[in-house]
Amino acid sequence: MIGPRAAIGYCRTIAVNIIVLGLLLVALEGLASYTILLYDIATTSPLVERRHTQYDPDVGWVHVSNIRLADLYGPDKYLAINNQGFRSERNFDLAVPDGKARIMCSGDSFTLGYGVDNTHAWCELLTSFDSRLETLNMGQGGYGVDQAYLWYKRDGSKFAHQIQLLSFITDDFLRMQFDSFYGYAKPVLKERNGSLVIDNVPVPRRAYDLSWITTQVGNVNQLRTVQFVTKVLRKVGLMSRNAPRTTESDSKEETKRVLRKIFEDLKRSNEMKGSRLVLVLFPVEDELLKETPHEWIEFIETESNAQGIMLINLFDNFHSLPRKDILDMFGPDHHFTERGNDFVARVIYERLRYEPSLAHVFSVHHHDRQAAPVTVAK
């Protein structure tokens, strides 16, 4: 039989072995986590947008003027920015040239034409259907509707135009709820007493001063030690949250209020210059193949009807296509391919061309080339 002292000794030995084994497992897990981190850091490429954007205190980031990047998105897929900060190979007069009708395209990377060259971005493709059209591409990667609105108000509204296309995906609404995007600081619009106010301006520029670190934020945040320390600091109030301190429902309602005010202001400012605001809602691949964002679609449709703003909702147009065709519309970067850009350009053009209130812009005798038939949702 084992005596009491021996039994206690065995228990202590077992306990020590368990503790040592536990510490070894923790060390191994930590070593594995840091090994993965080092690998991710070594293999993570900087955001493509960093090659053609710069810090801006009002909107977060804007294009670098007068730049041309060959093969940015692949062989022959170049990006050119003019002296005015728009995606174009030429500059524009403030006034619309004689014999032309101008369309301003505002939005995010889908409007920019991420993944294709200048000539295959849908905004530019609109001009291929009618030589009378002139388009200004104010698309910017990573923008929410708030930034697209602020950039247009500051730099785009001084250019005369007949139509402003404000284009967005539903993720652009989520971006409006945060004060940064992939670590890069941005302004936040809020609705206060019926008016829009801007928070987080001047936009902190530390993300641009420490661009390499900013690129690695997502990788570093995956470490359990970082997650633990961050949670503790937030718990004791030493670190602010990078998200609205409200419920998801409250944040969504706040976003809807801000969107209403943005639409109201853009409609009013366009009407004052003899222009027409048109909203364009783009789907992304997952929304077509998995889960449709019905709540946001219903909100945009209801709000556009209530304010008398024309809406081009491309969800139905895409849903009318076979699955294979839908897949061909999106590239591995989840943006429109050349075929996708061509498809949405044709839908948008046909909707604009047959809109009675825009008959003065799209008169029959100015129509040069018949766009191929598309499935157009009314």
Image (spheres, grey):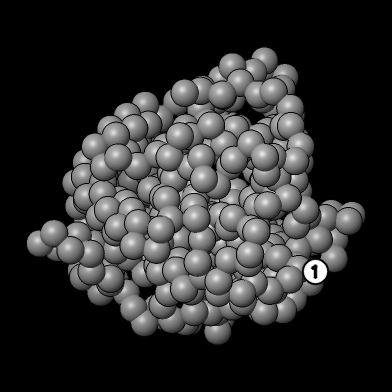
Position of 338 compared to 378: left or right? right
Residue visible at 23% across and 64% down? Answer: 196
Kindly identify the amino acid type of the residue bearing the numbered disc 1. Leu
Q: x%, y% of residue 79?
A: 76, 63
Quadrant housing residue 51: bottom right
The residue positioned 41% from the left and 50% from the top of the image is 277
Q: Is residue 263 above or below residue 324?
A: below
Which residue is the site of mark 1? 69
Q: Residue at x 29, y 63 (%)?
A: 189
Of 205 and 160, which appears nearest the observer? 160
- Residue shown at 59% from the left, 55% from the top: 101
Q: Secondary structure at mark 1?
A: strand
25 on left or right of 78: left
Location of the N terminus (image quadrant)? top left
Q: Quadrant of residue 94?
A: bottom right
Is residue 81 visible in this depiction of the protein? yes
Q: Residue furthest left?
A: 193
Q: Position of residue 341 (x, y in %)?
A: 69, 41
Q: Residues within 10 Å of mark 1 (few under 14, many from 20)?
A: some
Residue 345, x across and y down, in percent: 65, 39
Q: Nearer the viewer, residue 334 or 315?
A: 315
